[in-house]
Amino acid sequence: MISRLFRRGTAARSGDPFAGLSTPPGAGLLTCRVLDPVGEPVSQAEFTVNDSNGRKVVSGETDPFGTIVAMVPFGEYRMAISADSFSPYRGNVAITEGGVPTGLGNIALQIAPSLPLPESGEWEVEQAHTQIGFEARHIGLARVFGRFANFAGAIRIGDTIENSAMHVVIDAASIDTNVQMRDDHLRSADFLDVENYPTMEFYSDRFVHRGGNSWAITGGLTLHGVTRTVTLDATYGGTRVGMEGETRAAIVATTELHREDYTVNWQSMLARGIAVVGSNIKINLDIQIVPKGTQLKYK
């Protein structure tokens, strides 16, 4: 339990890794290591420390050795740790006076249970309950959000998910950022050039299970006439029965694209005074699939 606290000795003790670290008055040092079930460090695990009112005090990620070191005011806190493929960990921690770190020792995360996988066969993307969205920086300031309104997709579930395949086609002209002038510019030759490249397509090469309900879907994305390999970080949401008795499965996935990889030259556009969206584009997919041929009255 995270509430089992112990002290590791004073900062003046020989060999203390925190010796010489100055702690402000009224603050204490919180330390621990995050490990997997076999004792290996979990790097880039996200942690959050909230106060008794639920307000976030500090957050961050573990280092390559699974270590968390945070300086927080004296008080009672709730700590949460999460990482891909692992069940979330939550517990209480008290930071008290005394001038020594509050050591939580090793926190072992447990592998997240896997949801039952969809049956093998042909499935298709159900457009009414699917969104293909994106976000980008606008000239380094606020974020621009958008989506593609028209698309189609199919997934063939094999005897194992690893033997599955996915194909998605997106109508490039259906881009929508809620600003007509910007959308028209994004459709132009400066960006998507929809007249010459009317669609974007993704063909998967492989599905890799990362543990729990986390998957990596790798494949080729063709955009602006160029094909590059991308990896979707996917989370499988399980299957449910819909309002019309149909079977549905849900997947949430993200990836990041760099426009220069697809011959959309950002530096050239800056030189010409064109600055609509930033160079890095985050893609967000919220997908529902149904067995191929499913007839739906209410979508």
Image (cartoon, rainbow, N blue to C red):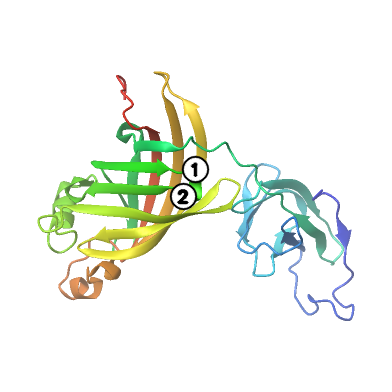
Q: Residue at x 51, y 51 (%)?
A: 215
- Identify the residue at the far front of this view: 159
Give neighbour class at mark 2: few <14, some 14-19, many 20+ (Cα, 10 Å).
some
For the residues marked 2 and 1, what is the alpha-carbon distance in whole angstroms? 7 Å
Image point 90% across, 69% down: which residue?
9
> Callout 1 environment at 10 Å: few (<14), some (14 to 19), or many (20+)?
few
Q: Position of residue 65 (x, y in %)?
A: 69, 69
Identify residue for label 2. 163
Q: Position of residue 209 (x, y in %)?
A: 55, 52
Q: Are marks 2 and 1 in contact (CB under 8 Å)?
A: yes
Amino acid type for the residue under numbered disc 1 = Asp
Q: x, y (%) of residue 157?
A: 43, 42
Location of the C terminus by quadrant is top left
* 153 sits left or right of 65 in the view: left
- Residue 216 falls left or right of residue 194: right
Residue 163 in sight in this render: yes
Q: For residue 159, which numbered disc appears in the image?
A: 1
Q: Quadrant of residue 259?
A: bottom left
* Image spot of residue 292 (x, y percent): 34, 32
- Amino acid type of the residue that numbered disc 2 sits on in the rendered structure: Asn
| Residue in the image at 70% along x and 63% along y | 70
